[in-house]
Image (cartoon, grey):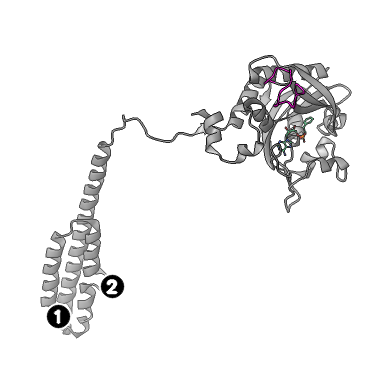
Amino acid sequence: MKDKLIKIESEFDSAYKEAKDLNLLEEIRLKFLGKKGSLNYVMADFKQVPNEMKKEIGQLVNKLKNKIEEKIAEKKQELEDKQNEAEINNAKKIDLTLPAKTNVGSLHPRTLILKEVEDVFVSMGFVVEDGFEIETEYNNFDAVNVPANHPARDMQDTFWLDNGQVLKTHTSAAQNRILKKYGPHCKAIFPGRCFRNESLDAGHENTFFQMEGIVVDENVSVSNLLYFMKEMLKGVFKKDINVRLRPGFFPFTEPSFELDASCAFCGGKGCSSCGGSGWIELCPCGMIHPNVLRNAGIDPDKYSGFAFGLGADRLVMLKTGLNDIRHLNSGNVSLLKQFGIKL
Ligand code: FA5
């Protein structure tokens, strides 16, 4: 058995010299120390060693095993160090000053419009708030004066979740939370993604963006609403845009209006973009219904407010002349190239 151990040691010594990389080293480790390796193989004969020699042979086996383990650990460290050094040297060869050849993205036209509208309102002292995409039935409907079984619920075909919550159908769903947060002195806008179970066409998507705005204080009136909307349009279109109000209906505003903007393309003379009328329907709005104020703990006899719900995608269409809303969610890169802004 002694001879066998000497043979294993010399085989190991020569194999060890050839271990040029970590894979080869692992092969050597398995060959000598693995379950089916030489040392285990020789130990199978240990039973046949005469008792008086068992101690000496046992010590020789252990010594050889320790030597092989130590040598392999040493070599492993040495090879790993070499590998790290090579990686560092290679990295040094990368010229970080070369201009990057990457395909940079661009901001989506809707992101740009929302940012523009936000900037205008922020400059007029509004805070920007966030809403949830999954809302309670109460916030989406009841809090804004649309109780269960009210026919007005049919105005918005809704995606219901199994737990009774909804994908918010309009940004008005955040009104109650925001009114409670700021109380009767509130000037806030809250953009957000909305969802409706719509039949899709050039003007309707199932997922679209709105920008809601509310102002509540003493003596807030329709003329304040008109002022802020005109300022917003001036900021977005970089010129004065006339607006007009038509009567509308929303359960959460009284009175309710549809606000039209004079066509930014023809200046109100009439063109294909405005169907010849000179006006483009822009955003529903109105004076906040007393019940909505009451639901947020605000006294409607003392305070009043207005609210509007601007369709952001329609505003993009208006500004860019895009003729189909579905392009906006299509992931169409040429749309981004045409209307987006390079980062
Ligand atoms: C509402 O959603 C009201 N919450 C708006 C409001 C807020 C009124 C505050 C009064 C006071 P409406 O369903 O009309 O109203 O939607 C508002 C705007 O969202 C529309 O004018 C339109 O620009 C946009 N919009 C609505 N449905 C879609 C749709 N399916 N696809 C794209 N845009 C849509």
Q: Is mark 1 within 8 Å of ligand 1?
A: no
Q: Quadrant of residue 282?
A: top right
Q: What residue is shown with label 1?
A: 53
- Towards the viewer: 286 or 76: 286
- Towards the viewer: 90 or 8: 90
What range of the chain is rendered magenta?
264-281
**x and y, in percent, of residue 260 in the image:** 77, 24
Q: What residue is shown with label 2?
A: 35
Q: Is mark 2 within 8 Å of ligand 1?
A: no
Residue pictured at 87% horizontal, 32% vertical: 291
How many numbered marks have been drawn onto this rendered protein structure?
A: 2
Residue 281, placed above or below residue 146: above
Q: In the shown orientation, is residue 94 left or right of residue 166?
A: left
Which quadrant would the N terminus be assigned to in this image? Answer: bottom left
View quadrant of ligand 1: top right
Residue pictured at 21% horizontal, 65% vertical: 28
**Residue ranking furthest to the top:** 240
* Label 1 with label 2: CB-CB less than 8 Å: no
- Can residue 167 be seen at all in this image of the molecule? yes
Of badges 1 and 2, the one in the foreground is: 2
Judge whether residue 187 is colored magenta. no
**x and y, in percent, of residue 150 in the image:** 88, 42
Judge whether residue 271 is colored magenta. yes
Give the class, few, some or many, for how many residues have Cα within 10 Å of label 1's Cα (few <14, many ≥20). Answer: few
